[in-house]
Image (spheres, coloured by chain):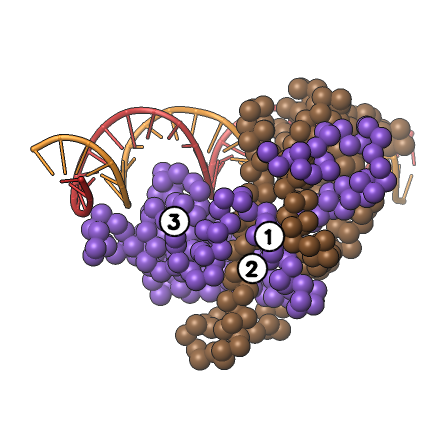
Chain colours: A brown, B purple, C red, D orange
Amino acid sequence: MTDIKTTPLASGSDRATGESGENLAENEALIQAIELLFFAYRDFVSDPDAILEADGLGRAHHRVVHFVGRNPGITVAELLGILRITKQSLARVLRELIERELIEQKTGTRDRRQRHLHLTEAGTNLERRLAVPQHARVAKAIADAGPEAADAWKKILLNLVNEDERAAVETLITNGEVP
Amino acid sequence: MTDIKTTPLASGSDRATGESGENLAENEALIQAIELLFFAYRDFVSDPDAILEADGLGRAHHRVVHFVGRNPGITVAELLGILRITKQSLARVLRELIERELIEQKTGTRDRRQRHLHLTEAGTNLERRLAVPQHARVAKAIADAGPEAADAWKKILLNLVNEDERAAVETLITNGEVP
DNA sequence: GTTTTTATGTCAGTCATGTTGACATATCTC
DNA sequence: GAGATATGTCAACATGACTGACATAAAAAC
């Protein structure tokens, strides 16, 4: 919120007040980028959604399966930090995944209060089934835009993340460790 | 789904089967891109969400206010096509927005069955309040990545959209018309 | 060694947003 | 006039989020 004044958009009535043509064009390009992000994300999640529905699962299960698969042994607290939901919300999803034997918990050795989460073999299969079409979509989108576009794309995405969490996100996605 | 075989990710067991180092690295970069999209989108919607909550509205209201503001006179059917929700879902959100006098309906002149949607002055104010921090975030993300990154970014986002809808999305976002 | 904090789990109730199915009304098209 | 179309509405339900309260076991602090 404090950044607002640093941008050319702070007036709050760009269209009404006389705005320079250049700012108008910039603003137009910005709106297009925002709408594109909306449409892209909508279709980005559509492939896994279709698979999940057939299994009687939801988007929430996908997120858990993804991050547990990506960070084997992750603890409940770490997962909560990534997903930014309450433990009560996570509990229901996690319980279903454990009941279906897609995820298993292992009591921590150093700290026996912790529950380290792992995908079972069935869980790994599900993770793969969900990932394949999504990977295909993103890989094709990047390839068709020219491979040099990928870095620019990722840079902007990272810049969209809250500034004070960028470093954490970066370490999380690069080495699969939870800081 | 039919695209899967055209990518290097089709095996469904990339990690288990012996995969070349290059494919592994590609796959790793892909996963990072996907996770970035998740985190970026999460924070991208967070600013408007906070404002909406104070007003007792939700993300669904934001989407309607955005697209009506962007496409004044849009019909209900066109809005349904963009949002991809059922008319019953839209009805509830729309009713609240109309009750609060943020949106008004005008009966079509050519086709009197149609309801053309417009933002009221209060609706325009809300749209502006929601847009300002979101625009600031995206503008800064793009500017900090170097302005030439913007085109690559938008290209990939468009490529993520279902192929058979890309043209429609493009016309929608470029001229604010609903095809 | 007792106290406090932490990690996790659970119960109960609520809200926002989506869904399906059925039906009503006004208006346009043939 | 008959049928198709655009919109609205009622009812029931699912998902995934939320808050608040409380329980247990284990670690950490004193």
Q: Residue at x 69, y 38 (%)?
A: B7
At 29% from the left and 55% from the top, the residue drawn is B116
Instruction: Answer with mark 3 or mark 1, whichever residue precedes in sequence.
Output: 3
- The residue nearer to you, when weighing B31 against C5, is B31
User: Is mark 2 in CB contact (under 8 Å) with mark 1?
Assistant: yes
Compute the Cα span from label 2 to label 3: 19 Å
Question: As displayed, is residue B112 above or below residue A20?
Answer: above
Amino acid identity at mark 3: Leu
The vertical placement of B36 against A56, above or below, is below
Element at label 3: helix
Q: Secondary structure at mark 2?
A: helix
Which numbered disc, 3 or 1, marks the residue closer to the eye?
A: 1
Residue picked out by circle 1: B157
**Figure check: B34 above or below A74:** below
- Residue type for callout 2: Ala
Q: Amino acid at mark 1?
A: Leu
Separation of marks 3 and 1 at Cα, in angstroms: 21 Å
Q: Position of residue A147 (x, y in %)?
A: 72, 53
Q: Are marks 3 and 1 on the same chain?
A: yes
Determine crowd level at label 3: few under 14, some 14-19, many 20+ residues with C-alpha closer than 10 A. Answer: many
Q: Residue at x 53, y 45 (%)?
A: B163
Numbered tag placed on residue A33 in the rendering: 2
Query: Which corner quadrant of the image does residue B68 belong to?
Result: bottom left
Q: Quadrant of residue B134?
A: bottom right
- Chain letter of the residue beneath label 3 in the structure image: B
